[in-house]
Amino acid sequence: MAKNPADPPRSSPLDPADWSAFRREARALLDQSIDRLEHAGDGPVWQPMPDRVQASLAIPSPVEPTPVERLRHELVESILPYATGNTHPRFWGWVHGTGTAGGMLAEMASAAINANCGGRNHGAIELERIVVGWACSWFGLPASAGGLLVSGSSMANLYGIAIARHHKAGHDIRAKGNAGVPLVAYASKEGHLSVSKAFELIGLGREALRTIPTDAGLRMDLTALKTAIAADRSAGRKPFCVIASAGTVNSGVFDDLAGLADLCAAEGLWLHVDGAFGAMVALAPELAPLVAGIERADSITFDYHKWLHVPYDAGCILVRDQALQIDVFGGRPDYLAASGGLASGEPWPSDLGIELSRSFRALKVWWTLREQGTRRLGEAIARNCAQARLLESLLRCHDIIEIAAPVSLNIVCCRYRPPGLDDAALDDLNARIVVAIQESGVAVPSTCRIAGRLCIRVCITNHRSRDDDFALLIDAILSAGKRAFSQITAA
Amino acid sequence: MAKNPADPPRSSPLDPADWSAFRREARALLDQSIDRLEHAGDGPVWQPMPDRVQASLAIPSPVEPTPVERLRHELVESILPYATGNTHPRFWGWVHGTGTAGGMLAEMASAAINANCGGRNHGAIELERIVVGWACSWFGLPASAGGLLVSGSSMANLYGIAIARHHKAGHDIRAKGNAGVPLVAYASKEGHLSVSKAFELIGLGREALRTIPTDAGLRMDLTALKTAIAADRSAGRKPFCVIASAGTVNSGVFDDLAGLADLCAAEGLWLHVDGAFGAMVALAPELAPLVAGIERADSITFDYHKWLHVPYDAGCILVRDQALQIDVFGGRPDYLAASGGLASGEPWPSDLGIELSRSFRALKVWWTLREQGTRRLGEAIARNCAQARLLESLLRCHDIIEIAAPVSLNIVCCRYRPPGLDDAALDDLNARIVVAIQESGVAVPSTCRIAGRLCIRVCITNHRSRDDDFALLIDAILSAGKRAFSQITAA
């Protein structure tokens, strides 16, 4: 009954019945996918999915098979056109990466391999160790450092804070839980939402995260931080961690990492740096001084899918001493025990986090870094910052537009401000302008509030934007502003 | 200065300089990826990455670009051959899905779209709502139900337990944390590691998760559970949740979901069902009675990347009342506020979990379910269970092999047992057999312990396995057993 294991043909009811026909469909979809990226600037940046398209997709759970050709048509006609728009040269809403054509090839191959990167001894795990090592080198972390690829900065912040808690709590958190120890930590008021959500999830509660005021440059105020730590200690609470921002989401500000490293060393606190997109300035020599001191962090969060343009999702948590990460997450039951063979290769990624199922993110990270190289990626980052300065200077030519915050990196916040309207009316006006520009398909800015006032926010993490794209944006602001002003004053 | 937005050509330094050349490379890689799947049964199931290959990959962080052609060759020669092996017909180690060729197309298109599915109003979010709705219908959940795609069951269990905690704690967990309330929950001793890791992370500690003994059929003992709840209550603790298994990882056993639903209703506890792979029997009519009662669960965990063969990673948490999930995770800061346009569309997926960056998993789920249909997927599940029964009967023809646990689903645990060896020696012998078979490349079983004894574990979640593949496995066990026995007795 034993046969040569290589004997063709094999077939599974879930594999294509006709591989040649499948290949033709696959090539057609590949061509259409590349067309989309080659012509990324054509058509609207964003358009809502029409009700009729939505209705056509919202069928009951399918019982019977559908031919691949028909699925490809549905995908190309009903899904591809209704994307967020972040592959388009004039997408500047929020901090979204642009993706690359090469990244798409890596994802295709990744699905063909179909690796589960929770553990075991295979090439995907090896590649993850290599790319994590590259990241450690960018930030000057020591040989003890390690880390894990995660979905993004939200997960990375969760892990950094959980590791800090474990090492500063003074008892066995894994067995006993928080156990009533009044642990507290600190972030500036410009810190990211994901940090307070992490405190909610790990059972300390968001009140355990103290909000520290910022100085005039929107950086965490170190004097206020010191005062808060002292107050907590004298009230019997237990400070354990400071969460610094390397590139705040509202305005791209960097906390004083070197000053915070000194303070954390003196106070015996864990320094976690949330560098979601900003930490990537380490790859642009003229911007790298912004993250001076990051080499002293205990843990660092950053994303590959933002300013390095790896396809979504791909983030990373780095830990100065990987052994501490294993203390928090390591250990496996019998059925996962290593006895050589495929089950060997310590530590498994599942010893560094909570996920036992993990996609092969390392391949697209590896491919993007190899294809582009860090020099070119760093240049694209620096170019985005130069474009923010250009946009600022272009906007300053228009008296009706106010620059709402200093442009320190890649984010421009401005406000269309015709005379005769109060702040509430201006908030309404600027919100209408942003929606009108998005709906026009010309560009995608977003909104934010600076000192309580609603602003138009242009966040440039886009390798496809050209200088003249920003002129189009200004035209759009001016004309949408004029129309919205008429609507408001007519009402 | 304003130009027609559709004006070609555009170029970015990170886009291909020559799109035609890029297309040729992309087609070549597509062909090689399809080759890999069309001939999934050729060659060894698994082989370790040789040191020279590892050394060739372990270069310092790359500064300069590398041509796509060279990267493709490196990928095909140094990475593709050293996979886990779960696309191969004789991979039966752990609970890994096999993937499909169609799933690869979806991943390719997904990277071309490059959607961040944390939120906003675009087609990817709409598609996620549709596929989550399909899953709700499989389990008979009411119209109030909803959920979220996640990386896998580890994350889904974390979310289910966190939502249960929030709703049963009796105070504001998000603001105040666990706050010393002695919350306790229950799972059987066959429960999954990810459940206790969730308790560690959420700050309750693994001791807050009570381990309930199992009955003779390895199901959670309901009488013991009731006793434990009563004991905790009388000791002043606060029971909040029961975590049931629908398909335990060791032997594929289903807890009595209907009985647990009654008990949870009577006790006022949350019923979370961990159905990582087992819940998918709902799609196979002859097996569906195993999950009777699941329609009464408060939350359900399952994976698409296991028995539905969607490419890694793709899991799901379903919640009976989606409003409760939003209570735990909802709320967004100013810069994400919805004011119409692209920022609209409530709720955002980030209101249902902690991730603000999320890949477009819904596309590969949608594609796989549309391409295959649930009938064919259910048949593949039933076939795997029939293959487990076949393997059991084939193994029973060999006196030297003992069946170590009842075969109730798709998992066969056996032990090679020549006379004259004690239990410790048999443990060593069976571990050697598994490693030897893995290293031979003929098949990949794994190990587990049943009643403390190390066994050969064959877990069949593979749509490419044919009946004669199991005959090859038995040959491999017998010959590896004979060799390992000689080694041990000679030592």
Image: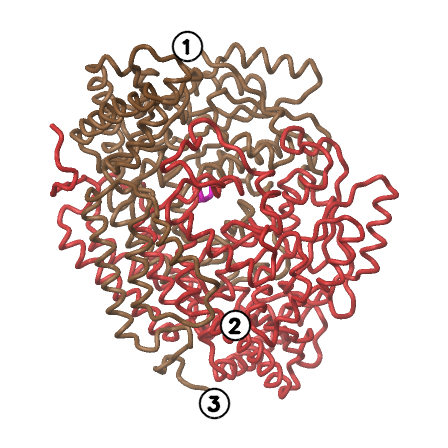
Chain colours: A red, B brown
Residue at image location 55% in from the left, 33% down from the top: B197
Amino acid on which disc 2 is placed = Gly
Measured Cα–Cα span from mark 2 to mark 1: 62 Å
Q: Quadrant of the N terminus of chain A?
A: top left
Vertical placement of A467 versus B450: above or below? below
Q: Which residue is mark 3?
A: B1
Is the residue at mark 3 from the same chain as the one at mark 1?
yes
Is residue B220 shown left or right of residue A200?
left
Q: Main secondary structure of the magenta part?
A: strand
Q: Which residue is mark 2?
A: A378
The spot of residue A137 in percent (x, y) is 55, 61
Is residue B152 shown left or right of residue B363?
right
The spot of residue B491 in percent (x, y) is 36, 22
Give the structural element (helix, strand or loop) at label 1: loop
Of mark 3 and mark 1, the one earlier in the sequence is: 3
The spot of residue B391 in percent (x, y) is 23, 22
| Residue B416 magenta | no
Residue interval drawn in magenta: B147-151
Other-residue count near label 1 (Cα within 10 Å), few / some / many at <14 / 14–19 / ≥20: few
Give the structural element (helix, strand or loop) at label 3: loop
**Mark sitting on residue B45:** none
Amino acid on which disc 1 is placed = Ala
Q: Chain of mark 3?
A: B
Is residue A377 shown left or right of residue B366?
right
Other-residue count near label 3 (Cα within 10 Å), few / some / many at <14 / 14–19 / ≥20: few
Amino acid on which disc 3 is placed = Met
- Which of the two residues, A249 or A424, is positioned nearer the viewer here? A249
> What is the residue that sits farthest to the front in this orientation?
B490
Q: Which residue is mark 1?
A: B216
Discs 2/1, front: 2
Q: Chain of mark 1?
A: B
